[in-house]
Amino acid sequence: MVLKCMVVGPDRNVTGQLLEMFRELGGINVVRQLDHYPHEHELLRVLRSLAPPILFLDLSNPGRCFEIIATVQAEFPGLQIACFHREIEPQLLLKLMQHGIREYMSSPFDPDVLAEVMIRLRDAAIKNPVISPRSNLVYSFLPSKPGSGTTTIAVNASIAISRQPETNVLLADMDLNSGLIRFLLKLNNEYTILDAVRHSTDMDETLWPQLVCGKGQLEVLITGKITTGVRLEPSNVRSLIDYARKNYKAIMVDLSGNMEKYALEVMQESRKIFLVVTPEIPSLHLAREKVAFLKDQGLQDKVAYILNRHGKSDLLQLEQIRNLLEGDIYFTFCNDYRGVGQSVAEGKEVSRNSELGRQFNLFANNLLDREAPGGMAKKSSKKDLRGIGDFLKFGVSRLAPASHSETKT
Ligand SMILES: Nc1ncnc2c1ncn2[C@@H]1O[C@H](COP(=O)(O)OP(=O)(O)O)[C@@H](O)[C@H]1O
Ligand SMILES: [Mg+2]
């Protein structure tokens, strides 16, 4: 088992020493290293999307450090924090203890001490999994080219998720000029996504129900009439998503593919960005261009391809499509012109008994199972725990007896 952690270390020298020590010890995967103290939204974004169970925090600016500690403890109870610093400062040590931080190291780091710290952190992380009260299941849907089937997939996957017990879903139509969800689901509402974004900073439980419409556990923020040149303030979009995280299990956002500023903000907040392609050269070409753009924005790690309308008679074989995309395909949906057409005519989902309907169901389950809220909340099974033995190749003798039986191979 590899232990995932995040490192915030503005003091490059001491952080470099710590990372070097991690490399020496092995078994530690630094999923993100920041050389600055992040703002609250940046910190939460990283923690939600990468879900590390451990945070290493450089104490060089104690004021900022304690702000970060407060945010992490409020938003991610259970996330283990270890602080490191150039030198030992007794007063800081005391303050850390008062904040419940028990792990503190100063340079030069001793591999034996660090191994002990890692073992204690790992044990604590297993005992108190990270549970965030907010959902991290935010998914963006983006067409490579208009007409790829993005909205169809976002709508059907949302309905399939909403059918799961105790799983409410928000579907936000953020294709402001060609928003179709209202029509596809025969919904109507006086208010639209624009109202929701505008009021996002003063949102409350009386205003929210007026903004959404829908059926059962699916609630939708629809678009209104075509409004050109609308600007949505990215920070308001972020507030909207933040409100939704507190109130829904999954948040699905249908985007136009025009890469508006607000769309990039949504993508930043997303766990995954589904880029929908069809098995045709122009669609694949545009997908590559979009990925290149997203790469420049630092978003490439979140991008997952969906191949839609795939059929046996396609000119391009799956392997060729993968090669053209230079990446794996996360999910494939079959071509079902009649089935989709019928569902649109009825204002409903694609029949659950059709092949496409079953695929939507499977896809929806994937979104929930693979990225369940608070990844670490999943209890480690005995099988998972066995792998920890690898990690214990250092410092086995210091292992706390309580966890010993579980780590035997
Ligand atoms: N799997 C599919 N099989 C057949 N037709 C589909 C499929 N997915 C989408 N379509 C059709 O493709 C067209 C474009 O779909 P839409 O969801 O509006 O795409 P986008 O949001 O990418 O612009 C629609 O007419 C829709 O009915
Ligand atoms: Mg669309």
Image (spheres, rainbow, N blue to C red):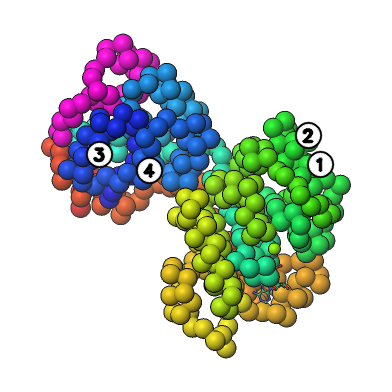
The answer to whether the residues at label 4 and label 1 have Cβ atoms under 8 Å apart is: no
The answer to whether the residues at label 3 and label 1 have Cβ atoms under 8 Å apart is: no
With 314 as the anchor, is 374 left or right in this view? left
Q: Earlier in the sequence, mark 3 or mark 2?
A: 3
Q: Look at the numbered disc 1 and give the secondary structure of its residue.
A: helix
Residue 76 in view in this figure: no
Residues in magenta?
Answer: 84-112
Does the magenta segment cover residue 110? Answer: yes
Q: Earlier in the sequence, mark 4 or mark 1?
A: 4
Q: CA distance from mark 2 to mark 4?
A: 39 Å
In this figure, which residue is indicated by the disc labeled 3?
19
The answer to whether the residues at label 1 and label 2 have Cβ atoms under 8 Å apart is: yes
In this figure, which residue is indicated by the disc labeled 1?
210
In this figure, which residue is indicated by the disc labeled 4?
32
Q: Look at the numbered disc 3 and give the secondary structure of its residue.
A: helix
With 244 as the anchor, is 367 left or right in this view? left
Q: CA distance from mark 3 to mark 2?
A: 49 Å
Q: Look at the numbered disc 4 and give the secondary structure of its residue.
A: strand
* Ligand 2 image position (quadrant): bottom right
Residue type at the position of mark 3 = Leu
Q: CA distance from mark 1 to mark 2?
A: 8 Å
Residue 141 locus on image (x, y percent): 61, 59
Q: Earlier in the sequence, mark 2 or mark 4?
A: 4
